[in-house]
Amino acid sequence: MTFHISHPDVRRAIQNALDEDIGAGDITTNACIPAAMKARAEFVARQDLTLAGAELLALLFSDVSVLRSSGERLPAGEKIAEVRGPARELLTRERVALNFLQRLSGIATMAAKFVAAVAGTGVRILDTRKTTPGLRVLEKMAAAAGGVVNHRMGLYDAVLIKNNHIRLAGGVRAAIERARSLNKPIEIETRAHAEIEEALACGAARLLLDNMTPEQAAAEIEFIGRRAETEISGGVTLENVRAYAEARPDFISSGAITHSAAAVDINCGIYAI
């Protein structure tokens, strides 16, 4: 899986990060390091991980050799990339580079664990919109690098009627009828058997079974009987995702893939040349 570094949101995120960190200039580096000094930097995994975001280094440095690609599973000690250039540039941009690599690889690593946990069931894991503001495109790319399927990117590209929509619209049927004008497949959140029956009667394309136990979800999926796609969501963790997968939904979504992923340990060593 390759990161699309030409995406405007990606370039904007990189520039914002540089502006935030450097401001008017790296006063420590500029004071300590001669302007003419050249250096090389090595980015190395310090734990087993699934890599994401190595391609972003090309937006941060001018002379980059990327040795491993997003989506690859790396053991501790594996070199990810080598960068060459002015020592000041390498020092000034090191932390921004690591922040992106560590955060995005953490998401990819978490995503890969979810995918591995449901192996053999045929269930596809989805990410959610529970992303860091301003970094959604990058975090969705990272989730995909880990093997999950990207759910909707935002509020603009898919219909998903949630519980609050249902309440404010006046019920399941009213919400679905109003959404028909969009001429898109309709997914609707359901929390009780009566809502499932009504959503099926109204022709919903996908039912999101929200905050059910694995046993409840299995019973409802059997009742639905392929009349609509099914997605389980709400309270899904790495510890219980296998139990939910054994209920045989089409999809399982989990916000934990992005909002609870821990940054992984990647080192950047810089050496004079």
Image (spheres, rainbow, N blue to C red):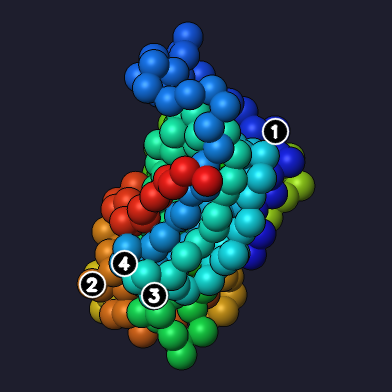
Q: Check contact, mark 1 vs mark 3: CB within 8 A.
A: no
Q: Which one is nearer the viewer's eye here, 168 or 268?
A: 268
Mark number, residue 239: 2
Instruction: Using residue 270 as the reference point, say whether residue 86 is left or right of it.
Output: right
All told, the count of numbered labels is 4
Q: Which one is nearer the viewer's eye here, 88 or 199?
A: 88
**Precedes in sequence: disc 1 or disc 2:** 1
Label 3 or label 2, whichever lies nearer to me, is 3
Alpha carbons under labels 1 and 3: distance apart: 32 Å
Which corner quadrant of the image does residue 244 belong to?
A: bottom left
199, above or below 129, in the image: below
| Amino acid of disc 2 | Glu
Mark number, residue 135: none
What residue sits right under mark 4 in the picture? 47
Q: Is residue 200 visible?
A: no
**Precedes in sequence: disc 1 or disc 3:** 1
What residue sits right under mark 3 in the picture? 75
Q: Which one is nearer the viewer's eye here, 124 or 249?
A: 124
Mark number, residue 8: 1
**Precedes in sequence: disc 3 or disc 2:** 3
Alpha carbons under labels 4 and 1: distance apart: 31 Å
Alpha carbons under labels 4 and 3: distance apart: 6 Å
Question: Residue 141: x and y, percent?
Answer: 57, 53
Which corner quadrant of the image does residue 75 belong to?
A: bottom left
